[in-house]
Amino acid sequence: MAASTESDGVEKAAILLLSLGQDEAAEILKNLGPKEVQKLGHAMAALKQVPRDRIEKVIDEFEDHASKGAPVAVDNETIKAMLTKALGDDRAANLISRIMQG
């Protein structure tokens, strides 16, 4: 299977949010920044209609990913890697220093 592109990941997140329903999706969206909400909103609007098999595939992939390994163990290096990948080196470094200071 080919590696997911960022746009593919955003589309999958949009499908997952839409499948949750308005209240649950709103709870997630209100914890995201404006740029992330804008990306997801754009992806949701672009979907128009999603075939049932595509929704099931995204949910199955999420479930499979979530079920691997019992507890989620997160260390500082994992957090740094995620933030750097999401935000880029400069923005992540600034945020990481603030997070690590408490």
Image: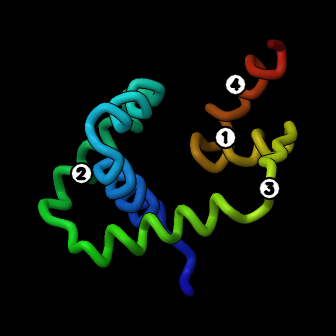
Mark with earlier residue (1, 2):
2
Q: Tag 2: residue type?
A: Met
Binning the other alpha carbons within 10 Å of mark 4 as few (below 14), some (14 to 19) or many (20 upward) gives few
Spatial CA distance of label 2 from label 4 is 30 Å
Mark with earlier residue (2, 4):
2
Binning the other alpha carbons within 10 Å of mark 2 as few (below 14), some (14 to 19) or many (20 upward) gives many
Identify residue for label 4: 94
Q: Quadrant of the N terminus?
A: bottom right
Spatial CA distance of label 3 from label 4 is 32 Å
Spatial CA distance of label 1 from label 4 is 10 Å
Above-or-below relation of 29 to 47? above
Residue 74 location, x and y as percent?
82, 42
Identify residue for label 3: 70
The image quarter containing residue 77 is: top right
Spatial CA distance of label 1 from label 2 is 24 Å
Secondary element type, mark 4: helix
Q: Is residue 91 left or right of residue 51?
A: right
At a point 40% along the width and 61% down the height, the residue shown is 12
Q: Tag 1: residue type?
A: Leu
Secondary element type, mark 1: helix
Residue nearest the observer in this picture, 76 or 31: 31
Colour scheme of this structure image? rainbow
Check contact, mark 1 vs mark 3: CB within 8 A.
no
Q: Give the foreground label among 1 and 4.
A: 1
Binning the other alpha carbons within 10 Å of mark 3 as few (below 14), some (14 to 19) or many (20 upward) gives few
Check contact, mark 1 vs mark 4: CB within 8 A.
no
Residue nearest the observer in this picture, 89 or 23: 23
Above-or-below relation of 93 to 39? above
Spatial CA distance of label 1 from label 3 is 23 Å
- Residue 83: which numbered mark, if any? 1
